[in-house]
């Protein structure tokens, strides 16, 4: 009998410990709203501002208790955000465009980088000097249809035949493990894998996506949320974006300090790479824009039209509703 | 009448569940990309039958290769463990350990070691299927009738003859029990392997469907995977019927 009482009471205690309520009290006795953000990939310098905002207490100042989550293998972050399971996500303009085309209520609320820094990269010895050379090669990707569609379109434009490309899903395998062995060319962010290649002294051939067509300077990565969150909890979205803006502004001002915060939160990252990558990326968060995160309707329209022309989306795309600047702080 | 009702009960419950599901989805107005109605899944299956068909073959091939490899390894391991106490003591911890390693964590490593071809996926299937077959076989060898064994020894049958005539046939029911369990998991093992990387197969198609919000297609593919798993079990049952005439 005694044993039973012990077991039951310890169970009750455990349950109590596990079922934390969704709002934590701060020292001032304020209620904190708990918020979940899901990244697009493992943590990297694209996400630095989020970690700075958490580390420096900017989220807390806005009354938010933010949890940053890494997606599982092949998880669909856009679906989780659109359905409201996750409050905010890191995504890409091509993904948001395609999702909205299929009636998924996903909205972009801030551009992490002002210009597209993504590129198709291959080892020098593979001899890929233009999109035309992709023919007959192996592409290593993460298995999303958007990716396949983009590849098809840029190749068609260059007069190349996509059907000769073998598209392999290499999942979460990193660029340096897969390139040249499992795949001949891959799609990378220069600010991470490109910088790492420089560090290792590896010569890469690169095709910048934004050079392939004027419409391809789209926003990637960006922050997303669902239409329902915008409607029901605009104050949470605003608080979140204000804190994140501060985080990215700090990362722009002081790359080194920001990088150290990213490493502190994710000690398994390669320290030297983070510092160098941050150095390269920090000036590019805001680049030529009036403030961090701001998005222009032209960029959404141009890319939407291009996707339509290429037959990648079915219906005509409403650029106005796909993104918003309303949650960003008023530009000074 | 009652007999027919009893016989048709499984089909009835499935049908009732489907009707309920259909009705719930329509009534609550859940968007199709969160939970599709059975009718939509059916439509998605029909519209994509071509791709599903062409992606089924690689998965079936991996399943059969993996299961074959598992049977061979299990035979060798169980036999050698049966023949010698030393081997048994040596291998038993490895046998158990092989089942405690999380496959999901190991599979990406396989991909790094062996690339994105067929081999790593076959290994995943073999790793999942090997254990139930080996353990059941070993039990089967050891559960042979003691009196029979003494009789055969008295009549001067050698170790090898005794194995062929006595231990092997009497262990068959155990072997098929293990194989049935393994077959149930085999297709799932192949799908897990494909899910983690590659260029064809149902697992990869699952990834693509989920990435493109085609939840109806996602469910349709799962239905195909379930059907294939059941077919594998059916195949094992058919084999056991053929190979053990004394059990009919």
Image (cartoon, helix red, strand yellow):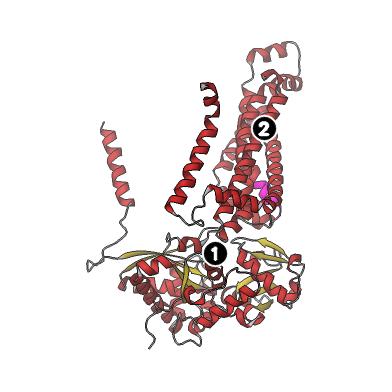
| Residue appearing at x 43%, y 72% in the figure | A50
Dot 1 falls on a residue whose secondary structure is loop
From the top left corner, tell me how far across and down residue A303 is, in percent.
58, 77
| Residue appearing at x 52%, y 52% in the figure | B36
| Residue appearing at x 41%, y 81% in the figure | A250
Dot 2 falls on a residue whose secondary structure is helix
Magenta extent: B117-123
Residue B53 in view, yes or no: yes
Q: Is residue B164 left or right of residue A316?
A: right
**On screen, residue B18 above or below A223:** above
Chain bearing tag 2 is B
**Residue occupied by mark 1:** A102
Most frequent secondary structure within the magenta stretch: helix
**Residue occupied by mark 2:** B236
Return the residue nearer the eye: A322 or B230: A322
Q: Is residue B186 left or right of residue A107?
A: right
Q: Residues within 10 Å of mark 1 (few under 14, many from 20)?
A: some
Question: Which quarter of the figure has residue A196?
Answer: bottom right
Q: Is residue B128 magenta?
A: no
Q: Is label 2 on the same chain as label 1?
A: no
From the top left corner, tell me how far across and down residue A282 is, in percent.
49, 81
Chain bearing tag 1 is A
CA–CA distance in space, label 2 to label 1: 43 Å
- The answer to whether mark 2 and mark 1 are in CB contact below 8 A is no
């Amino acid at each position: 009998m005694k044993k039973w009482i012990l077991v039951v009471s310890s169970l009750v205690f455990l349950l109590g410990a596990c079922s934390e309520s969704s709002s934590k009290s701060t020292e001032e006795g304020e209620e904190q709203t708990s918020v979940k953000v899901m990244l697009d990939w493992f943590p990297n310098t694209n996400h630095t501002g989020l970690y700075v905002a958490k580390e420096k207490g900017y989220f807390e100042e806005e009354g938010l208790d933010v949890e940053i989550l890494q997606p599982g293998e092949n998880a669909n972050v856009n679906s989780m955000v659109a359905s409201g399971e996750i409050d905010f996500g890191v995504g890409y303009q091509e993904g948001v465009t395609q999702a909205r085309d299929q009636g998924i209520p996903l909205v972009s609320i801030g551009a992490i980088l002002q210009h597209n820094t993504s590129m198709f990269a291959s080892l020098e010895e593979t001899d890929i000097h233009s999109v035309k050379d992709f023919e007959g090669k192996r592409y290593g990707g993460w298995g999303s249809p958007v990716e396949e569609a983009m590849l098809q379109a840029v190749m068609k434009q260059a007069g190349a035949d996509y059907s000769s490309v073998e598209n392999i899903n290499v999942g979460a395998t990193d660029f340096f493990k897969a390139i040249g062995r499992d795949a001949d060319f891959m799609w990378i962010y220069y600010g991470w894998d490109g910088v790492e290649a420089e560090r290792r002294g590896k010569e890469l051939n690169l095709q910048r996506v934004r050079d392939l067509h004027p419409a391809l300077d789209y926003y990637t990565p960006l922050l997303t949320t669902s239409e329902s969150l915008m409607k029901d909890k605009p104050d949470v979205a605003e608080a979140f974006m204000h804190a994140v803006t501060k985080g990215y502004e700090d990362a722009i001002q002081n790359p080194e300090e920001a990088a150290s915060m990213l490493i502190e939160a994710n000690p398994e990252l390669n320290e030297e790479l983070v510092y160098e990558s941050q150095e390269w990326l920090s000036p590019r968060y805001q680049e030529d824009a009036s403030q961090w995160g701001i998005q222009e309707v032209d960029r959404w329209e141009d890319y939407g039209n291009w996707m339509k022309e290429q037959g990648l989306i079915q219906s005509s795309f409403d650029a106005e509703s796909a993104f918003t600047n309303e949650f960003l702080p008023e530009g000074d | 009448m009652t007999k027919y009702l009893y016989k048709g009960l499984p089909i009835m419950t499935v049908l009732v569940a489907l009707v309920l599901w259909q009705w719930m989805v329509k009534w609550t107005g859940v968007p199709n990309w969160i939970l599709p109605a059975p009718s939509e899944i059916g439509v998605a299956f029909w519209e994509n039958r071509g791709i599903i068909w062409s992606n089924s073959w690689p998965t079936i091939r991996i399943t059969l290769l993996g299961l074959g490899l598992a049977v061979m390894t299990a035979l060798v391991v169980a036999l050698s463990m049966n023949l010698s106490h030393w081997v048994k003591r040596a291998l038993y911890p490895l046998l158990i350990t092989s089942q405690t390693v999380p496959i999901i964590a190991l599979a990406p490593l396989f991909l790094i070691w062996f690339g994105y071809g067929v081999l790593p996926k076959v290994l995943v299937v073999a790793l999942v299927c090997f254990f139930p077959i080996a353990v059941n076989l070993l039990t089967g060898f050891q559960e042979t009738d003691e009196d029979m064994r003494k009789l055969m020894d008295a009549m001067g049958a050698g170790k090898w003859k005794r194995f062929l005539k006595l231990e092997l046939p009497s262990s068959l029911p155990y072997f098929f029990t293990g194989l049935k369990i393994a077959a149930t998991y085999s297709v799932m093992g192949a799908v897990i392997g494909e899910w983690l990387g590659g260029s064809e197969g149902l697992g990869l198609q699952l990834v693509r469907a989920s990435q493109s919000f085609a939840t109806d297609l996602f469910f349709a593919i799962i239905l195909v995977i379930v059907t294939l798993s059941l077919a594998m079990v059916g195949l094992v049952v058919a084999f056991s019927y053929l190979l053990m005439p004394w059990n009919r």
